Amino acid sequence: QVLLVESGGGLVQAGGSLRLSCVASVSTLSIYTMSWYRQAPGKLRELVAGLSSGDSTNYADSVKGRFTISRDNAKKTVYLEMNNLKPDDTAVYYCNAVTYEFLRRADYWGRGTQVTVSS
């Protein structure tokens, strides 16, 4: 079982920045991938950024060059640095952790943090 708690959301003007944090209840070294997803009203949840245990990253095209995902293993925390925010970035942002236990994949989710970008 992995518990995830997000923080750092809020209201920001377009062009501004926010840093989201996701604290895990277990060592991030034991997690296969950690990712940030978002879901805007009336839309499907989408992958924003992912970070593997091997430190490879992937980003949605819409955030490339603006968002950065990183990890602090000592703090069991994954971050999402968001710069040059746009109104289209408005959504609830969720932290996701994927583990493999006896070859079975398990997905864990946080409760989300709201990000609102005003124009």
Image (spheres, rainbow, N blue to C red):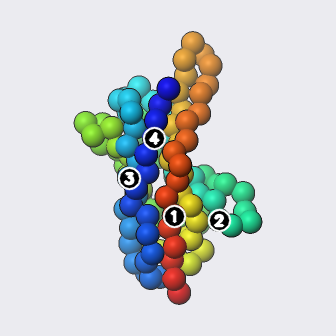
Q: Residue at x 61, y 25 (%)?
A: 105
Q: Nearer the viewer, mark 3 or mark 4?
A: 4
Local packing at callout 3 (Cα closer than 10 Å; few below 14, some 14-19, many 20+) is: many
Q: Nearer the viewer, mark 2 or mark 1?
A: 1
Outermost residue toward the top in this view:
102
- Name the element at disc 1: strand
- The alpha-carbon separation of the residues under discs 2 and 4 comes to 20 Å
The residue indicated by pointer 2 is 40
Amino acid type of the residue that numbered disc 3 sits on in the rendered structure: Ser
Q: Are marks 2 and 3 in contact (CB under 8 Å)?
A: no
- The alpha-carbon separation of the residues under discs 2 and 1 comes to 10 Å
The residue indicated by pointer 4 is 4
Amino acid type of the residue that numbered disc 1 sits on in the rendered structure: Gln
Q: Residue at x 51, y 77 (%)?
A: 117
Q: Do the residues labelled 3 and 1 touch (CB within 8 Å)?
A: no
Amino acid type of the residue that numbered disc 4 sits on in the rendered structure: Leu
- Name the element at disc 2: loop
The residue indicated by pointer 3 is 21
